[in-house]
Image (cartoon, rainbow, N blue to C red):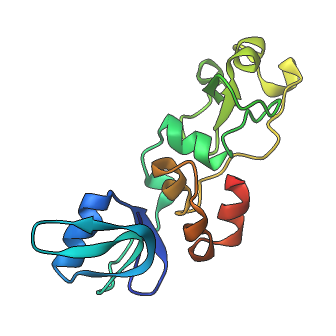
Amino acid sequence: MLVLNATFEPINVCTVRRAAVLLLKAKAEIVEHGQWELRSEHTAMPRPVVIRLMTYVKVPRDTHRRKITRRAVFARDGWACQYCGARQNLTVDHVIPRSKGGSSDWTNIVASCAPCNRRKGDHLPSQAGMHPRCKPAAPSPNVFIHVASPTIPPAWRQWLPIATVADAA
């Protein structure tokens, strides 16, 4: 389930169970619901697809300090190799190898397919003749929604920024 802040800004993804708890505690409201119902012995409610929190939650914007994970790098790079565009056998690559003084931060790590990663090896981009298609940078906060859900359901699209939706397509 997509979670929107009180200001309708997308901030997270949660399970159906967590969404139901937030709804039952009146901490959230349903913005979009599915065709099915959630039922218990005493109650039924529409299955939430998008919920909105009733109170504003301050979201940290320091994405440059967020933990770098493989899935976050893949989501930032559109789930494609930054050297050839392949979408299978993805790994991460240090653009400037650590052995050559490269850092392990958002500006030096890209998604790479295994064949490209092996071909580049321990060389600088200029030595290998392989340069990333896009300059690596810290991701937007919405990338972390793609980490939780690589496939964006159609009901979420109107709530996500255009660039984020285009990246998922």
Q: Give the vertical position of 134 relative to 130 (above or below).
A: below
Residue 52 is at least partly visible in this image? yes
Farthest left residue?
42
Residue 153 coordinates in the image, percent (x, y): 56, 60
Q: Give the vertical position of 36 relative to 111 (above or below).
A: below
Quadrant placement of the C terminus: bottom right
Q: Nearer the viewer, residue 18 or 86?
A: 18
Kindly identify the residue that appears in the image at 67 percent across and 54 percent down. Answer: 168
Q: Quadrant of residue 77?
A: top right
Kindly identify the residue that appears in the image at 24 percent across and 77 percent down. Answer: 23
Kindly identify the residue that appears in the image at 22 percent across and 74 percent down. Answer: 44
Quadrant placement of the N terminus: bottom left
- Position of residue 27 in the picture relative to residue 121 (left or right): left
Residue 43 coordinates in the image, percent (x, y): 16, 75
Q: Nearer the viewer, residue 30 or 134?
A: 30
- Position of residue 32 in the picture relative to residue 115 (left or right): left
Residue 96 is at least partly visible in this image? no
Q: Nearer the viewer, residue 96 or 119?
A: 119
Kindly identify the residue that appears in the image at 35 percent across and 59 percent down. Answer: 14
Q: Nearer the viewer, residue 23 or 36?
A: 36
Residue 163 coordinates in the image, percent (x, y): 71, 65
